[in-house]
Image (cartoon, coloured by chain):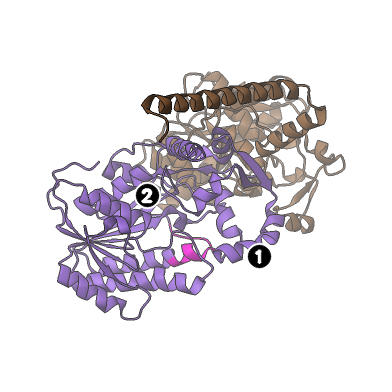
Chain colours: A brown, B purple
Amino acid sequence: MESGENGHDDADLDDVRRALAALRDEVHARLAGRAASGAAPAWEDLFERARRSLSTLGMVERSGEVDEFGMDEVVLQRASRVFDFLMDTWWRVETTGLDTNAPPLPSLFVANASGLLPWDGIMIAHAVARARRDAQRPRFLVADWLMTLPFVQPRLARVGGVRACRENAERLLRSGRSVISFPEGVKGSTKSFRERYRLKRFGRGGAVRTALHMGVPLVPVAVIGAEETQPVLFRMTSVARLAGLPFVPVTPTFPWLGPLGLLPLPARWHLRFGAPLDLGALDPAAADDELVIARLTEDLRERLQAMLHEGLREREGIFA
Amino acid sequence: MVSEAVVDAPSCIAITGLDTFAGKRLALRLLARPRPPVIVGLDLRRPWRLEGRIRFHRVDLTSPDAGSRLAELLVRERADAVVHAAFRRDPTPDVDYDHELETIGSLHVLNACAAAKVSRLVWLSSSMLYGPRPDNPNFLSESHPLRGHPDAHGVRNRVEAEGLVESWRRRHPDAGVTVLRSCWAMGPTYDDRVVRHFASPVVPTLLGYDPLLQFVHEEDLLDVIERAVLEGHPGVYNVVGRGVLPLSTLLSLAGKRSLPLAPALFYRIGRWNAERVTGDPPAAFYDYLRWLWVADGERGWDAFGEPAYSTREAWISFVSSRRMRRYR
């Protein structure tokens, strides 16, 4: 070795200096590059934005955190503005029964299904959330076929939709969150315009069973007006099978106006919250008695049907 | 870390599939204990790091006499606990061999355990066995049926193997059997197909789908395995981290780009390449990025304690370790 101890150190130091200088130059160059790219051609910017919105499904602004069912507070907050508009301006939703006989939360809300998209669930959840800011936002159950639809499913989950199944409902109720269910199921949301406001069979009594099992009250909610927002004239099943949907609805506006035809009509809505049906007096063991379940389910269906009839009688007009 | 004083800890632990991530790391952890148990390692290859510190026997689980040879070894070494980790890390194109090793090999191990009257058996399984299904509830409990995936042969083999364990457990009620169903593991050193999928800067995803995913950190997983073998927790447990995150959030946390592919097209085009690499069509893996298959970890957390890392922390631990790797 030619160089002594000191010489060796100097050489090392020089190396370090040179490396640092190179690093500094690179940082400067990159910063300059970034500044220059601010004035990059607009199409590049446009492409990047399109790519981002495609990969985030249009939910560019969101928090880094979701709750266990995939609800995102930031997405919800932004969506709330749209929900407010729909509630106050578009559908002019009138709510009764939320303040007079306020249901204890958590409860299991049971409503008539209307239309393909779960606007009814969103509106009920929004109405309850606005009236009861102290409690956790209720979550609405969504039929299977909608919860498996690409693009639709993640969006619904971010604003509080949950796949309709007993495990999910019980988990939500156990953690103190109310649940909005539509026991008619797919049969309810696909009924045609002629059958509107006539309740179908309430599944196999899952709603009553869940309420009994979890010890929460059942609150019937009559949604009046929603069944006119997307009137289904008839259903196309052959085309639908190709696309993997249960059916394709034919409404006055869809598919004639394209995606625009999916826009719900501005009928006037009325949400009537009924008196809570407390099953607390019943033995929880009744949750295993099929006959009791069937009778309670039929009771609930009749009560909701009566509420619907009453609401329809009092209504002055579909849009008025 | 598992506390030092464990009553009723086994004095000799046999590990099948020693040369796997879980086998090797578990052996090292057990050897680092103040009074280490005797460790009998069983595999085709001896991991060099464990040279001379364990009693290694070369056993081929795909050979027809593996059962009797294994039984003989377990009796001779007086093993009182067996950890079965001899599963493929990733599915391979050799579908028949995978089946011989994972299902028939499991059968041999169970037969040997019965013959040697092993009192404790820890079975490494996966929450992938529940299967990604559009009709899954958001959280799958341990009692949910294992529906697997029709295309994924590795998952199919292990569903079959779990069926064998279940019937074995019923026939041998005095043996404590722990089945650990862990979700995808993440961490600085763990490596498998899932990790490699997420390691690239551009991650293929499915257009229109954004499932909730969960991870468990590798150290939390090893903690649970160690506790299961030392303390004995008979039963079936999901081993997962707390919390769930959408795939899109995971990728943006990591600063990765997603490459959304239309499933209908991609499942057709990607078929040839996927079958060459894994022996399965793309759906076997990508359906796990399409539908829900989140497991409910409550029971496992009650039995084995709170995991140190949440899903987000496990993911960040993986991402940050990969970032540093580029500068090595």
Q: Say which mark, if any, is on residue B272.
A: 1
Q: Say which mark, if any, is on residue B26.
A: none
Which of labels 2 and 1 is toward the front? 1
Depth order, front residue of B54/B163: B54
Within the magenta stretch, is there residue A27?
A: no
Q: In this picture, is B55 found above or below B322?
A: below
Which of marks 1 and 2 precedes in the sequence?
2
Q: Residue at (32%, 42%) from the top-left corner?
A: B301
Residue B159, horizontal then vertical, whole percent: 43, 64
Occupied quadrant, residue B146: bottom left
Classify mark 1: helix, strand or loop. Answer: helix
Within the magenta stretch, is there residue B156?
A: yes
| Residue A93 seen by the camera | no
The quadrant the C terminus of chain A occupies is: top right
Occupied quadrant, residue B14: bottom left
| Cα–Cα gap, marks 2 and 1 | 34 Å
Classify mark 2: helix, strand or loop. Answer: strand
Three-letter amino acid code at the position of disc 2: Asn
